Image: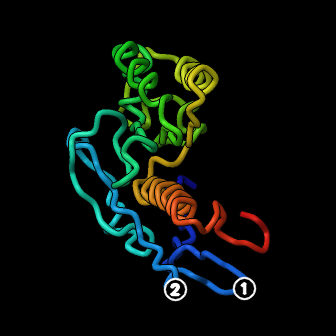
Amino acid sequence: MSDRDRSFVSPSTSRLRVMRDGHNIIRSARVPKPVVLVDTREQEPLPLFVNHPNWIGGERRVALKTGDYTVEGMEGLLSLERKHLADLVACTVTYRKRFLDACSRLARLRWKAILVQATLEDIKGGFEPFDCPSEVHPNTVCGTLDAIEAKFGIPIIYSSSIQDLATERAASWLSKHFTYWWLETQGHGRVLIDSDGL
């Protein structure tokens, strides 16, 4: 059975829980939802707000210096770079220098990640099933990602070639980073659930 034929658990439709002394303080503390800034060069941006209005407060298109997605107010702190499989393969060889320069800029931020819109199984299975014929060996792509993570300290998030799953992953990542940051800057501590410290 292929991933496209499978059904997946629906994403949560509730807000993030921010608990203090057994009570959710989302409303009382007026914890906002992040407004995501999407780089104008993103040709087919992920529908973060449309798919996840419970986590994302809105989206705006702007020219970003680094990455494809950030959050309003966190432009110098956070960035998410997204790579479709075909783009990732091209960045491994053809556009390698440009990609590594972008990774060098991304590494300067406090919170960063590369969201790969594919699973490790997708990459290791070869690129032809994704209409991405290439002379590039899958191990070259995996090795490049491992080297980027080791050299630059940029986490690699393998998500899915299914756009809704990749969108969910990105929305969750962005909203959680924003909420932790907002709580910390507002004096509520860098914790979502005080009973377990998460």
Task: Give the answer, above or below, for where 102 lies relative to 168.
Answer: above
Q: Is residue 172 visible in the rendered structure shown here?
A: no
Q: Residue at x 50, y 62 (%)?
A: 182
Q: Give the number of the mark in front: 1 or 2.
A: 2
Is 174 on the left or on the right of 150, as rendered?
left
Which residue is farthest front? 187
The spot of residue 165 in percent (x, y) is: 48, 58
Measured in 3D between alpha carbons, the distance from the residue under mark 1 to the one under mark 2, in whole angstroms, is 13 Å
Q: Residue at x 37, y 37 (%)?
A: 67
> Disc 1 residue type?
Gly
Q: Is residue 93 visible in the rendered structure shown here?
A: yes
Residue tagged 1: 22
Is 68 on the left or on the right of 111, as rendered?
left
Which residue is farthest right? 196
Q: Residue at x 49, y 85 (%)?
A: 27
Mark found first going from the N terminus, 1 or 2: 1
The spot of residue 85 in percent (x, y) is: 42, 35
108 vs 44, nearest the viewer: 108
Task: Give the answer, above or below, for where 188 lies relative to 94.
Answer: below
Colouring style: rainbow
Is 36 on the left or on the right of 60, as rendered?
right
95 vs 102, nearest the viewer: 102
> Disc 2 residue type?
Ser
The spot of residue 41 in percent (x, y) is: 22, 38
Residue tagged 2: 28
